[in-house]
Amino acid sequence: MAKGQPTKRQMTEQLRILVAEDMATDAELVLMELARAGLRATHRIVDSEKSFVDALREFAPDVILSDFSLPGFNGMAALALSREIRPDTPFIFVSGTIGEESAIDAVKSGATDYVLKSNLVRLPSAVERALADALARREQRRTDAQLRESESLKGAILESSLDCLITIDHEGKIVEFNPAAEATFGLRREQALGKAMVELIVPPRLRDAHRRGFAHYLATGEGPILGKRLELEAVRADGTEFPIELAITAIGATSKPMFTGFIRNITARKEFEEKIKRLNRVHAVLSGINSVIVRAGDRNGLFREASRIAIEHGGFRMAWIGLVDKEAGIVKPVAFAGDVRGFFETAPLAVVENQPAGLGLAGRAVREMKPMISNDVRNDPQRLMRTEMDERGINSLAVIPLIVGSEAVGVLSLYAGELGFFDSEEMKLLVDLAGNISFALEHIESEEKVRYLAYYDSLTGLANRTLFLERLGQHLSATGSGRRQLALVIVNIERFKTINDTFGLQVGDALLKQVAGRLLELYRDPSRVARVGADHFAVVVPHAEHEDGLILGLEQSHRRINEDPYVVVGTEFRISTRAGVALFPSDGEDADTLYRNAEAALKKSSSGDRYLFYTKQMTERIAEKLSLENKLRRALEEDEFVLYYQPKVDVDTRRMVSAEALIRWRSPELGLVPPLHFIPLLEETGLILQVGAWALRRASLDHRDWAGQGLKAPRIAVNVSPIQLRQHDFVDVLKLAISDGVAPPGIDLEITESLVMEDIQANIGKLASVRGLGVNIAIDDFGTGYSSLGYLAKLPVQSLKIDRSFIIAMVDDPDTMTLVSTIVSLAHSLRLKVVAEGVDSEDQAEALRRLRCDEMQGYLFSRPLPLDALTALLEPNG
């Protein structure tokens, strides 16, 4: 029996049969055949239209068996009535005769079957089949009704659901798209149906991954996202993306499955989560900075830590704190963190309207004393520096004023990568934070003021004696116990009390400020200068092991403080000072001892002394040097300098080919003074510039005079000091000095190798200009410096002079001999002439001849000669 077909027992218990038959015997035969087949049922027999209609309504038969021909009432009429009143009840014709056409018409009109009375054995099976078909139809109608009800419920759910319900088929095309989906994605249902879901709601950057995952599921039946809740990104019809929560269910056969996605827009939830995260970040900044405030000892440390915490704990892209500089009219950044490179160069930091950069948020925050916010930097028409913001990924910024008392003294500036970061809750916390920083700033400034007055002079801003002694100790420790020395100088303004008493304290204070300013200009490092008394200042001078440099510095300092007048309230004041000097470590190995001895030296000094050293011998040496300096200045004025000439001879012929000019000082008091006794002092004092120019001019004139006397005038080599060559106008000075000589000039310059290498590029240019004047150039003391072969080839020189130390050593030292040989070969390869200086023996001369040196100079041939003696050696011209 087919699935769903009723059994005979079920049909017997339920079966009601209506028989339309005018022959009682035929009716009985029909019922007997059914009974014989086991179909026992309640029955009713009718033979008229009225009784048939009544039975249909009252008896409610399960099956109708009707004769085709009834007196006054035929079977087709009965069929029509049954279709009208009981359309679902099976109707079987049981007739003696029925033609084929009539049978076809009957079936078309709704008859279930027909059975000939001559073949009643087929009737039970026909009844069973008709009943089964009727039952199946009823079940189908019930199923259809349930389905319609389910579809109606589904439609109601789809229509009323707050979540998006989207169903796609196995091709990924949308087959269901509920109103919530329409509202969420900005698409009408008819626009979505039949379209590929991936093209409508999946962001472009994710579409390829979606297609691969979908194809993988169809191929394998495996899907990592089915039955799970996922957070993804979706896209609206207008192209905007937003976060969603998605759950997907597969429906139907595995060959052609369908998928329903339950989608929820979680933008609000995500925004809330982000808000909580932002608040937590701001809370972390607030907590971290409050901890710093508790232990902060100074303003700069507080600001640096606050900026760092804003970046590390708050996740801000950039943070800085600035203080108002009233004189400059700007907010000056004093601490910052994050990517601030180049940011402040173009930042609008003005607090006054007429500044070139314009009034930015920092200036407005200060002027209006309230926070300034931009929650969408790129689209804010008031914001400058969009390029700088874009480069740093900044989308929001806030500037909160730091208010102390009733004045905005600075700003806290924070820059976030998120749009809309600074809403009311975040700003409330940040305003509280700025208030805490302002309170700490006020407290720190009070403490700093107390500390400042304990360690600094309130008038000049210099360190006071207490702080200076601490710093002096630090300088002594840094100097160490080696050969390095340090000088402590205590300066006293003479007769300062008279100025105070005569002109008043205000004038005296103004004068002290100006003296302090000049000392700072001289020594630059504030840690080395202090005001240690009413009219006393102290200075630390490092590197005092160079006595000459120390004296030069003391002289410059004395001149700077004393020579130019001070102008106070329109009145000029000239002061005189004297100083006491103590040297570390000879005059004291600790700060207190050194300070006491410098004070002692000052007390021992008398009016008119510029400075006095604590050690008598030092003072005497300084006095001697000052006396010598004065004599040198007078020597220049009185034309006491003379030139001596030392011949240079050809190696082979030993005939004089040129000479070197050497300065001598013929002092009326000291006699002929050797150059080592005065040349270093000329260089220290700068007098070498004047004396060097004189030597060039004198040598040029002597060369001219020899030529004028008809003599073979040798070329004259003049030494150039480092100070001369370093002057930017050196070439002009040289040109002027030789202008009175013959043309072309017979002057050569000798310049030491180490001096040339000081600034090789600049010196190449200078020496090229010298060659342009017709002046030859020799590299003096060659071999003692560190010139490279590459640079040597570029130098516009004509000869090398081998240092006398090599000449002295080469006879007894094979290595030195090799070095001299190498120098000669190198020079000749560069087409340079080689001159050996300091040749004092025949062994040296013979060795140089074998090495093919070009010229020699030394006591073996002649000591330096005065002008007349050299002139006597010159041969007539022609």
Image: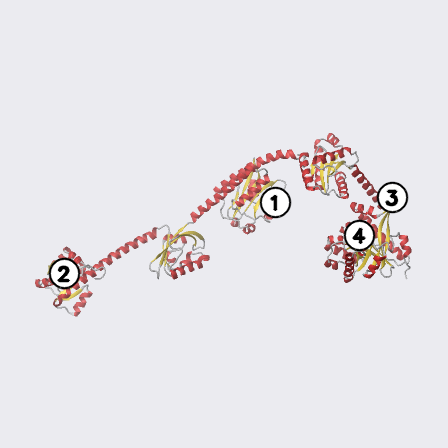
What amino acid does circle 3 point to? Leu
Q: CA distance from mark 4 to mark 1?
A: 53 Å
The mark nearer the N terminus, 1 or 3, is: 1
The mark nearer the N terminus, 2 or 4, is: 2
| Marker disc for residue 720 | 4
In percent of width and height, residue 255 lies at: 35, 62
| Marker disc for residue 42 | none
Task: Please state, as top left, top right, bottom left or bottom right, where the C terminus lies in the image.
Answer: bottom right
Camera-nearest residue between 320 and 716: 716
The mark nearer the N terminus, 2 or 3, is: 2
Q: Residues within 10 Å of mark 1 (few under 14, many from 20)?
A: some
What amino acid does circle 4 point to? Val
Q: CA distance from mark 2 to mark 3?
A: 166 Å
Q: CA distance from mark 3 to mark 4?
A: 26 Å
| Marker disc for residue 355 | 1
Q: CA distance from mark 2 to mark 4?
A: 147 Å
What amino acid does circle 2 point to? Gly
The image quarter in which residue 216 lies: bottom left
In percent of width and height, residue 222 lies at: 39, 58
Query: What residue sits right under mark 3 in the picture?
Result: 670
Cβ atoms at labels 4 and 1 below 8 Å apart: no
The mark nearer the N terminus, 1 or 2, is: 2
Query: What residue sits right under mark 2 in the picture?
Result: 38
